[in-house]
Image: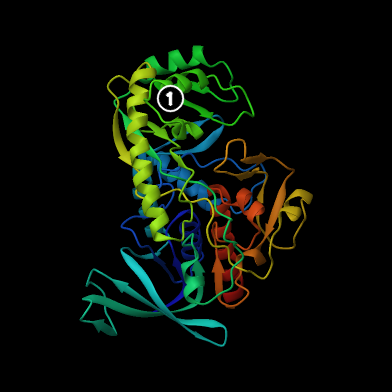
Amino acid sequence: MFYDVVVVGGGTAGCAAAYMSGKLGLKTLLIEKNIHLGGTITSGLVIPVMKSGNNQINTEFRAELINELKELGGQTTYQDNPAWFNPELAKIALDNLMRKANVEVFFDTHIIAVKIENKNIKKIKLSKEILSVSTDEIDMEKKKLLVSIEARYVVDATGNCEIGKISNCKFLEKDDEFQPVTLRFMMGGIDLNVFSKWLEEYDTDRNVTTIERKNGHVHLSTAYTWDKDRKWALEPIFEDAVKKKILKRYDTNYFQIFTVPGMSGTVAFNCPRIIDYNNSLEITSISKALILARQNIYRYLKFCRVYFPGFENAYISNIADMLGVRASRRIRGKYIYTVEDLKSGKKFDNPAVISDYPVDVHSNKKNGSTLKSYKEYQLPIESLMSDDIDNLFVAGRCLSADYMAQGALRVQSSCFSMGEAVAKYIYSHIK
């Protein structure tokens, strides 16, 4: 089984890389450990895809996904951003796009080994639970199908840089360079007309609370954090809930909600943000974070029913299948992008990303987070190339960048651009 490009990880960056590779005529395989594509958008419920400036490049996949979701009724334009997505319909949209680009997709599949010769990945050994493809080796003890595949180029879009790890690549992260993780969820059964009218009057700060009514649908967002960088209208409500022991002080560190296209009466929560157990590379840490987060979610349900008009009959309709991880492994690439590069707006011959998204680094301490904007900046394609393996690229949050610069580049719109840029670069070198 030979491919021009094998993309490992079907999240935002991986889908963009696979789609563009296939569209350019390269024989492409996309390998995903879950049973659907989308990563943070679908499994993580991370919506919307935030805007990252007016001069973005490598945006063809993003535009195609917007159009596909619009056809399915799972997209809306809100606050001048067309990338408000329905996470369930996104699963279908991404399947459709891969089919249109002739991308072969393996679901429920894991990489277990690679064969490296002369600084190139020659073979990838993967395991599949489903015995439905040809094989050159069967592990009868484990009762899993083992398949060896070959590729000219490999794209690691796993987020945690799993292919880089098993390839013994060098990394940049330090032991203390983790950010709080988040487990997103949704509530249904909400009367959005009642809630939006109350919220519109209660919070008049349109930099925090926004509301639009279009074609009979209500679109809204609002937020609160325990940081004292601004006056939050929702603060008295949260303080009262803590006083009455409906919430714990811990629960007030971050709170943000959005409506969801195509899901009437539903609100998505960008919380709870877990300020303990943030080493996303340790099983024990992540397991504790998940348990703690689900307890927080239930307290949020009780809180919303008590304090928010329109939430009287609300219920938890969906809890994300994965934690929202902001920082983990970062590969050492042919170029290590720094926050000084970002601040200066340094130009590069082969930019993969152009963005003005702020340096957004969350902290587990009150008033410790960073959210600072700079002028437009570029990320070079060399920051997406492994320095150790010549045919290995990365795309997504595991890029070659320092901790603070990665805090600006980890967002979904930049991940789309990274994946697309890698595919175009590979195509130019194959052809």
Quadrant position of residue 240: top left
Seen in the image, is 202 located left or right of residue 103? right
Neighbour tally class for label 1: few under 14, some 14-19, many 20 plus, Cα within 10 Å: some
Q: Which quadrant of the figure has residue 135?
A: bottom left
From the viewer's side, name the closer residue of 284 and 115.
284
Q: Mark 1 belongs to which amino acid?
A: Val
Percent coordinates x, y for residue 406 in the rendering:
62, 54
Q: Where is residue 398 in the image (x, y as percent from the top left)?
A: 55, 61
Q: Is residue 349 visible?
A: yes
Secondary element under disc 1, as helix, strand or loop, is helix
Looking at the image, residue 82 lies above or below residue 398: above
- Position of the N terminus, as image quadrant, is bottom left
Q: In the rendered view, tell whether residue 191 sits above or below residue 32.
A: above
Please determine whether, in this image, residue 1 is positioned above or below residue 324: below
Residue farthest bottom in this picture = 118
The quadrant of the picture occupied by the C terminus is bottom right
Q: Can residue 43 be seen by looking at this rendering?
A: no
With 278 as the anchor, is 368 left or right in this view? right
* x then y, percent, for residue 365: 57, 40
Q: Which colour scheme is used?
A: rainbow
Q: Which of 403 and 368 is in front in this view?
A: 368
Q: In this view, does 49 lie above or below 386?
A: above
Q: Name the residue under label 1.
A: 242
The total number of labels drawn is 1
User: Residue at the spot x=37%, y=30% of the render?
Assistant: 300
x, y (%) of residue 382? Answer: 66, 67
